[in-house]
Amino acid sequence: MDLAVTQSKRYGNLFLDMLAFNRKTWETGWNFNALIVLNHDEVVYKLWSGEPNLERFETKKKPLGPLQELDGTLRPPSPY
């Protein structure tokens, strides 16, 4: 069983974020993982883990912005 509740929020320059030059994301929440093994309605093994306070900061930078994803579409197809 995997349970997770997360919220993400982008922050920074709106213009750079919309054109995919620089995206900054802040994610908060929690997660819980559990493994329960049953044998004829009897718990044989149990294992659980999780993080009560998740806090992640992620920065994605693309120097070419939206043009960086067009690398395969600008080349002519290979004859092979």
Image (cartoon, rainbow, N blue to C red):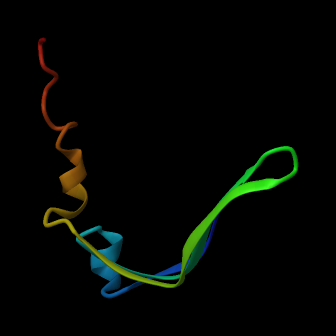
Vertical relation: 14 (above or below) 66: below
Whether residue 1 can be seen here: no
Given residues 42 and 49, the one toward you in this image is 42
Given residues 12 and 31, the one toward you in this image is 31
- Image quadrant for the C terminus? top left
Q: From this viewpoint, which residue is outermost toward the top?
A: 80
Q: Position of residue 60 (x, y in %)?
A: 26, 70
For the image shown, how many numbered marks are present on the structure? 0
- Image quadrant for the N terminus? bottom right
Q: Position of residue 68 (x, y in %)?
A: 19, 54
Q: From this viewpoint, which residue is outermost toward the right?
A: 41
| Left or right: 25 in relation to 37 | left
Taking the spot 19% from the left edge, 65% from the top edge, the residue there is 62
Vertical relation: 70 (above or below) 63: above
Residue 63 falls in image quadrant: bottom left
Taking the spot 86% from the left edge, 44% from the top edge, the residue there is 40
Taking the spot 20% from the left edge, 37% from the top edge, the residue there is 72
| Left or right: 78 in relation to 29 | left
Whether residue 58 can be seen here: yes
Given residues 68 and 2, the one toward you in this image is 2
Q: Position of residue 65 (x, y in %)?
A: 21, 64
Vertical relation: 77 (above or below) 54: above
